[in-house]
Amino acid sequence: MQNDLSNLNDLNDLTDRTASVPRPAAGRRRLAALGVLAAGALVLGACSSGSSSSSATTSGSGKTTSTTSAGLTVTTVPKGTVVHVVVGDSKGLNGPMTLVPTPATVPAGNVTFVVKNTGTIDHEMVVLKTDTPYDKLPIADGGDPPAPVKTGADKVSEDANIGETGDPNLKPGTTRTFTIKDMKAGKYVLVCNIAKHYGMGMRAAFTVS
Ligand SMILES: [Cu+2]
């Protein structure tokens, strides 16, 4: 194989070329898909998901390590901005919970969220596109997926969900990464929408400038 995949530029070069080939060989297609997953920066027609986010296991620094079909290990840093989000608690449902993004304001474009659960119970992180202040979202939903309920509401609506850590929830001590492509300038709210967690403090303002 002529291509050296030891750095991001080469991987992107290969991905770009592959994307322009009408019917790439299976191996190359898989390689291209890996590139998209790793870089979180390209959209190929082959993507069947309607979601704008992708996920991969990372080291916690935003770097993604993938092993190609050729057996090469490729470490890439996603294009765009990396936001580290720490979700946590110290007493589960018996104490306050926190969700802290750093930085809380980023430039428009691709944004990779590296979410680490430093708490004692499962958490998640959901990005909502809303102008409502982060601590004023109505707790009017319940169930999974969340839906409006007349009594026993313990979640906020996820109608404005544009990206999330997804299933399963993050176990204590684990980290998960996902990228939202082409985030537009505006106001967002980051929440953990596991039952009761939003109300117990797992919410933060997030701005794209
Ligand atoms: Cu939580």
Image (cartoon, helix red, strand yellow):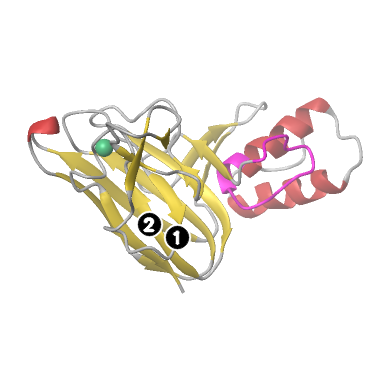
- The residue under the point 81% across, 46% down is 19
Q: Quadrant of ligand 1?
A: top left
Assess whether mark 1 and mark 2 are in contact (beta carbons under 8 angstroms): yes
Question: Would you identify the image quadrant in which residue 188 lies?
Answer: bottom left
Extreme residue toward the front, this view: 150
Respond yes or no on whether mark 1 lies under 8 Å from ligand 1. Answer: no
Q: What stretch is highlighted in magenta?
A: 37-50
Residue at 43% x, 42% y: name it.
177
Mark 1: which amino acid?
Thr
- The residue mark sitting in front, 2 or 1, is 1
Task: Pinpoint residue 30: horizontal percent, then vertical percent.
Answer: 72, 30
Q: Quadrant of residue 157?
A: top left
What is the x, y in percent for residue 176?
39, 37
Q: What element carries label 2?
A: strand
Element carrying mark 1: loop
The one nearer the camera, 36 or 96, is 96
Q: Is residue 52 left or right of residue 92?
A: right
Which mark is drawn over residue 1? Answer: none
- Secondary structure mostly seen in magenta is loop
Which numbered disc covers residue 130?
1
Image spot of residue 183 (x, y percent): 55, 61
Amino acid type, residue under disc 2 in the picture: Val
Label 2 sits on residue: 189
The N terminus is located in which quarter? top right
The crowd level at tag 2 (other Cα within 10 Å; few <14, some 14-19, many 20+) is: many
| CA distance separating discs 2 and 1 | 7 Å
